Image: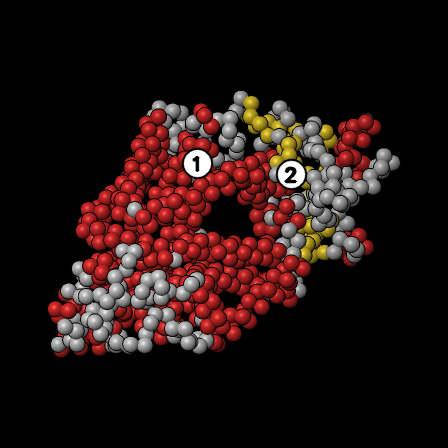
Amino acid sequence: MPEDDEYFGKNGEPRKYDPAFKGPIHNRGCTDIVCCILFIIAILGYIAVGILAWSQGDPRKVIYPTDSRGQFCGQAGTPLENKPLLFYFNIMKCASPMVLLEFQCPTTQMCVEKCPEKFMTLAKAYINRNDFDYYKSFCKEGVTNTMSMPELLKFGLCPAMLTPSKPFTRRCFPALGQKGGVITVGNNSHFDDGSGNMRDAKDLIDGVKNATVVIEARQVVMKIFEDYTQSWYWILLGLVIAMLTSLLFIILLRFLAGIMVWVMIILVILVIGYGIFHCYMEYAALKGEAGSNVTLQQLGFQTDFTVYLQIRQTWLAFMIILAILEVIIILLLIFLRKRILIAIALIKEASRAIGHVMCSLLYPLFTFVLLAMVIAYWAVTAVFLSTSNEPIYKVVNETACEHSRTTCDPANYTTSPMKTQCPDSECLFAFYGGETVYHKYLIGLQFYNVFLFFWCANFVTALGQMTLAGAFASYYWAFVKPDDMPAFPVFSSLGRSLRYHTGTLAFGSLLLSIIQIIRVLLEYLDHKLKGAQNKFTKFLLCCLKCCFWCLEKFIKFLNRNAYIMVAIYGKNFCTAARDAFFLLMRNMIRVAILDKVTDFLLFLGKLLIVGLVGIFSFFFFSGRVKAFENTAPHLHYYWVPILTLVVGSYLIAHGFFSVYAMCVDTLFLCFCEDLERNDGSAARPYYMSSTLHEILWKDPSPSSAQPQHDKDVRLKPQPAQEDNTA
């Protein structure tokens, strides 16, 4: 037929019958060798970057506060081991804008055992020996009773005053309070600043505010870390339950596919429905409560996320989101009800394939281990790189000085010309940085670390896809199942992938990594230009981010099918990607209707497991069930373990359901190949089972209308071998 010739001309030539083809080719050669060599060189470079970072980095800079001499407060094995708190000589200087630029207050900072507990000025403490002995604990080393008070102030050996303070993230901040609407510090609304001037307690607010801006994120991180230390075993138990639930679901799906899919659909609707009901009950319960009608915009960002749960608008937003999701799922189920029946039958066939390759269900654990190693290496290297800067010291002075904010060396500053010209100046620690070649290219090393993280993570994912594709292709192209299958199909496929196709895996993952790193750069650029961008720039960035998101999805889809073709034929990436693309184009109707409907059903399965784990963890950690009040740990943020369990359970469910998804995609591609190679006759029998033929033949595409096939034979094929397990 002329229209068929034109169709096939646009989408490649269909496969021809080959009596020697028996499934995944064993006699194959290495593919994409150049990319394999490039990947090995990149990995060696990644190891070199890690070694360099570990030799230069110092994570203590993140853990411990740093005093004006660049020493770590409270570090074990040092003279400051018993001085874990950082004390500011003049906290009001933290109100300087330089704090937000260099993340360091322009005042002397020293490590102390405990924070000041009472008001005291140097002038008053100097008169009383007992008070001065207490005062000296907040002065620099070497201060004696014989030194005069002007001398102590001139050389900056002691602070001019002490204010009652409390430790906050290992730093001493004024104990600010409020009495009758007036800001107080230590129950007093005024204090002596040490110069004979009485100041309002509210003058301390700006200094405290700017100082806390610098450490606000660290405070949240520390609280989250404490929550993890209190709840890690419960989180681990929850993840084990999610893994067992996913495994049980997959096993039941193997034997009761039809029933389990319908149970899954109904439970997803019920779980989301309960979520809507719970949000409504919380929304109604907050009616009339003081402060519950504050909007999210008025509240702004709060580090204590539980505050948001006291606002009605939060629960209203949750309720609307869940309602929209519920409506979308119900509408899809209604419009796709006929295709869902066919997709269920396809899942049943995939269950039979998995039944012959049961060890494929354990392969996601191997992928998890490899990904955990990649993530751990990236995270450790990132921490060491970010802490590999050297301490930078700058001149700080009270009066005008031409050397102000100039870099200095504290070791010889007292004898330097800068000290001579500016007698009241000091050389204080400012921030971590550096001027060496290593420090100049530190941002490039961080970029390389991120890029190699994407490349290695995508490589591990690609290895899993090709391995499973090869195993399931061995099942499909086995004429007598399971006699014609390899003894260990997963291990055989894994060996072929690593031995012959490391370069192909590296090539496909490289393409995906380039797109992902571009997306990261666009997000970074958007964040940097957010304050200054005009409408055109905002529109352009939005379009670019949308385009690269779509491109990433397309590359993932193309890579996935290319790996299937590589697993079967052993060709290079470009050839396999072209063949897979044209094969899918020749079966576009089946791809759009059947394959994607099956993905939708498997996604509902993931959603169900995540929803169940999320609901149970919410009631457990929030303490809303009296039976768990004494069992659940007391946390700063109970959403920390809940969010961890939701994300972790989704990754676990995705790992197990990805086996089914890969099986369905492989069987589908092999089916399309089988239709083009064979016609169901005795001379050219189909390799598919009669069940699979009945499932997918209901939606014939142009590729099934080949001129050389007998029409009657195609409508009523006679498979040479039935699948006994069917």
The percent coordinates of residue 388 (x first, y second) are 64, 57
Report the Cα–Cα distance between label 2 and label 1: 35 Å
SS state under label 1? helix
SS state under label 2? strand
Residue 171 is labelled as 2
Question: In the image, what residue occupies the spot 40% across and 47% down?
Answer: 247
Label 2 or label 1, whichever comes before in sequence order: 2
Image quarter in which the N terminus is found: bottom left
The percent coordinates of residue 252 (x first, y second) are 34, 46
- Looking at the image, residue 655 sits to the left or right of residue 201; the answer is left
The percent coordinates of residue 484 (x first, y second) are 35, 66
> Which is closer to the viewer, label 2 or label 1?
1
How many residues crowd mark 2 within 10 Å: few (<14), some (14–19), many (20+)? many
Asked whether 225 or 83 is in front, the reply is 225
- Looking at the image, residue 376 sits to the left or right of residue 332; the answer is right
* Residue 316 in view, yes or no: no
Badge 1 is on which residue? 617
The percent coordinates of residue 123 (x first, y second) are 77, 31
